[in-house]
Image (cartoon, helix red, strand yellow):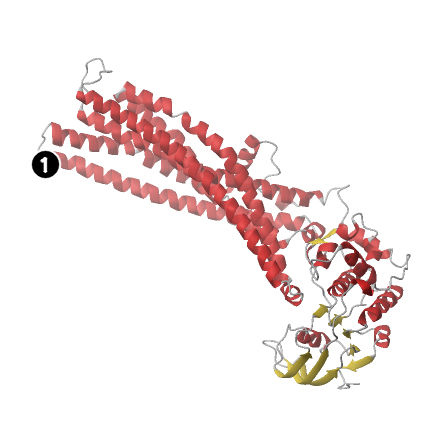
Amino acid sequence: MDDTLAADTLPPPAASRADQLRRLDALASPVRGTLRMAATCTVAAGWLLVPQAALIAWLIQQGFVDSAAPQALVPALAALLVIGLIRAVLAFGARRCADAATTALRTDLRKQLARRVLAAGAPWLRRQRSGALSELTGTHVDALEGYFGGYALVRVETVLVPLAILAVAFSQDLVVGAVLLLTMPLVPVFMMLVGWGAEAASRRQLRALARMGGHFADRLRGLGLIRLCGRGEAELDGIRQAAEGLRERTLKVLRLAFLSSAVLEFFASVSVAVIALYLGLSYLGLIDLRGGAALPLGTGVFLLLLAPEFYAPMRRLAAHYHDRAGALAALEEIEQALAAGRGMDRPGAVADPEQALRHAGRADASHPRAHPIATRTVDTTRAAAISLDRLGVRYPGATRDALSDLSLTIAAGEYVALAGGSGSGKSTLLETIAGWHVPSEGRLAVTPQDSRIGYAPQRPFLFHGSIADNLRIARPDADDAALRDSAEAARVMRFAACLPDGLDTVIGERGFGLSGGEARRIALARLFLRAPALALLDEPTAFLDPDTERSVLDALADFARGRTVIVATHSDVALAAAGRVVRLDDGERS
């Protein structure tokens, strides 16, 4: 790692809870001064509660007991107004400082994460789901805001403000001071018990959110393939289920957060009620714990005003306690992801899957095998006929047509090859027939209209998951035998058999770890498994050695029986295998 990263504040993986908390606090080192200013304003505003309550109690004592003249109360009222204004300014300043610090902290942390992810190297990076990585810099970083902007400030307030109120209460009445002192330890005990569950729930919620983000991003990128395979409703159901699971986990986190607050509210309410009961019974003369000394009304009001404020910082701490749990869970997820990335750079680390698959690909030529497609494993469907009448296609924003004035008829059951130079419109024509483009002019007709269409594009989209999962997107109900037959026919097994987990080997997003030819063979196997009436293939034999190309074309010829097949290719061998060749660059339609 370079010198820039060495100075990053992003911590390495934590070894213990205490160590993790220290590392979490260490993230704030660049904005430590701003956070201290926010904490100072918060504590000062809390301390001013004491003189504010004292002034209110003095006004009540003078006005209702000592019958002081109204003009004598004016200075105290003015002082009370000034203290209220000062507290409002301090609260505003604390919030502004906290917001500025957390904004700067999140920006800096996202920059560090980007550098760390890039430093992990392309092999590690391309094995990750981009949606999950985006959650690291999005939701996971945002989860730290509540900790530094809320919990960390209230934690300082909880330590300093209640102690000041407790000292004042003891100076006025030992019984009230004792009640406050005895109830104070209950707060951290119950918060700790609730916090254990809150952190675990927050960790599960963040992981579910990361999985859902990765899943949704994958599906957006492969939307064309999903629509072509008729998997739209099934994928929507999967997203609904993932969203429902995330909703349930979020509600569990909220339930624990509310429980934490409810526990503290209960003990705070009971404690204030005990103090109020003690003062009331003392004024009625039913109990005497002061040794005969009368308690002035102003003192009683002063203590009653301070009692709720003694628990107020603790209540706020309970409200923010789930932010602590969420921040710890987010930091752990970030550390684990980046620790995996650092492991890719160490000597002796797990081998790059791309290298392993390259080695497997080189084994193809040394193990030539013929595996004619097992047509018994795919359903025979009606072949489709295609009619193009003066078809034109123009991409949005383009200044000229990608296809223009194209008329062509392809009979049902024909095996047609599209030839022409790069840019002649072969891929555009296949995508238009597949329904990915809307013609700007002319007419396109596929008969029958409900024909099942299969498309193996030049750059096939492969999802993050196993090879078998990527095949089953075409037919989720396919059994293992059908899956293997299709893989054999497309010569996928030539390289998959060399992998440790065979078809269950996990590949990266967009097919990372596979060569271009291997990705095309998986797309071809997916098309075989779908068993369409109309098969569209874009450069299916590109990047294949001659033996493998010949084998794939033989399998495609077997598959074409009873189906309409259109292949876009530059290969002379593939052109020779077709029943008819259509050249798009010279106007020939033979």
Position in image of residue 162 (x %, y %):
35, 29
The structure residue drawn at horizontal position 48% and vertical position 30%, both measured from the top left corner, is: 192
Total tally of numbered discs in the picture? 1
Position in image of residue 52 (x %, y %):
25, 34
For residue 402, what is the image quadrant?
Answer: bottom right
Q: Which residue is mark 1?
A: 71
* Element at label 1: helix
Vertical side of 324 occupied by 233: above or below: below
Residue nearest the viewer, comparing 324 with 206: 206
Q: Is residue 148 visible?
A: no
Vertical side of 101 occupied by 400: above or below: below
The structure residue drawn at horizontal position 87% and vertical position 61%, both measured from the top left corner, is: 371
For residue 346, what is the image quadrant?
Answer: top right
Q: Is residue 201 visible?
A: yes
Indicate left or right for 60 with 572 as reference: left
Q: Residues within 10 Å of mark 1 (few under 14, many from 20)?
A: few
Quadrant in the picture for the C terminus: bottom right
For residue 333, what is the image quadrant?
Answer: top right
The structure residue drawn at horizontal position 50% and vertical position 45%, both measured from the top left corner, is: 250
Residue nearest the viewer, comparing 155 with 303: 303
Amino acid type at image mark 1: Gln
Residue nearest the viewer, comparing 162 with 280: 280
Which residue is the extreme one toward the top? 291
Position in image of residue 407 (x %, y %):
70, 86
Indicate left or right for 370 with 583 as reference: right
Indicate left or right for 391 with 361 as reference: left
Vertical side of 355 occupied by 572: above or below: below
Position in image of residue 545 (x %, y %):
86, 64
Quadrant in the picture for the N terminus: top right
